[in-house]
């Protein structure tokens, strides 16, 4: 069955939230966006990669960051379906995203779909350290939760 990409709708919320919580440390940006904005927000966009009814990848973009002049347009990516991630990678390029954040294996799979759409691809490893969100200069209206691994 061919993988299909579509924008997530409110009925997908529980499925997307459960799927992203498989790896809460890697998905903290996406989970935060989902909890803060939901799936009907004008500010945030979520796309899913589906094999039949099975969700195999999620791409999240935040329109506020996309409009910030000093920041490149970026998306956060998570998934376990390589075809779906490659297609989400192509979608990110078509939407003008300059940076994809996510676990290395997800980004590598997305890079397969990006190869014909970008002139240069650079990958960097990022690591998370303990942070104090209450001291962050960015203020959000949703409470911050601690992400832990299983």
Image (cartoon, rainbow, N blue to C red):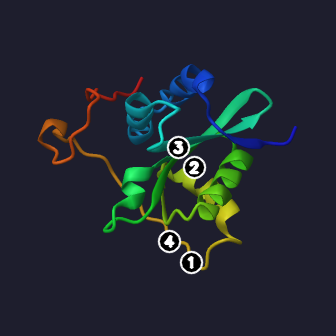
The residue pinned by badge 4 equals 122
Q: CA distance from mark 1 to mark 4?
A: 7 Å
Q: Which mark is residue 62?
A: none
Secondary structure of the residue carrying numbered label 4? loop
Secondary structure of the residue carrying numbered label 3? strand
The residue pinned by badge 2 equals 106
Pointer 2 local density, CA inside 10 Å: few below 14, some 14–19, many at least 20: many
Residue in front for this viewpoint, 106 or 51: 51
Q: Earlier in the sequence, mark 4 or mark 2?
A: 2
> Residue, x 28% and y 26% (percent of image)?
145
User: Residue 73 location in percent, x, y?
Assistant: 45, 62
On screen, residue 65 versus residue 146, left or right, reads right
Q: Quadrant of residue 51?
A: top right
Asked if marks 1 and 4 touch (Cβ < 8 Å), the reply is yes
> Residue, x 26% and y 26% (percent of image)?
143
Q: CA distance from mark 2 to mark 3?
A: 19 Å
Q: From the viewer's perspective, is the residue at label 2 or at label 1 nearer?
A: 1
Pointer 4 local density, CA inside 10 Å: few below 14, some 14–19, many at least 20: few
Question: Which image quarter is the N terminus in?
Answer: top right
The residue pinned by badge 3 equals 45
The residue pinned by badge 1 equals 120
Question: Which image quarter is the C terminus in?
Answer: top left
User: Residue 115 location in percent, x, y?
Assistant: 67, 70
Q: Quadrant of residue 121?
A: bottom right
Q: Earlier in the sequence, mark 2 or mark 1?
A: 2
Q: Residue furthest bottom?
A: 119
Q: Is residue 41 above or below residue 18?
A: below
């Amino acid at each position: 069955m061919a993988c299909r990409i579509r924008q997530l709708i409110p009925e997908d919320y529980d499925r997307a939230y459960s799927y992203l919580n498989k790896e809460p440390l890697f998905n903290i940006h996406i989970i935060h966006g989902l909890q803060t904005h939901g799936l009907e927000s004008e500010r945030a966009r979520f796309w899913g990669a589906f094999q039949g009814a099975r969700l195999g990848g999620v791409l999240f973009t935040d329109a506020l960051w996309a409009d910030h002049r000093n920041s490149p347009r970026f998306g956060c990516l998570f998934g376990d379906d390589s075809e779906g991630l490659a297609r989400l990678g192509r979608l990110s390029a078509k939407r003008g995203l300059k940076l994809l954040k996510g676990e290395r294996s997800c980004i590598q799979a997305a890079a397969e779909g990006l190869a014909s759409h970008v002139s240069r691809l650079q990958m960097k490893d990022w690591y998370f350290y303990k942070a104090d969100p209450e001291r962050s200069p960015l203020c959000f209206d949703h409470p911050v939760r601690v992400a832990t691994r299983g």
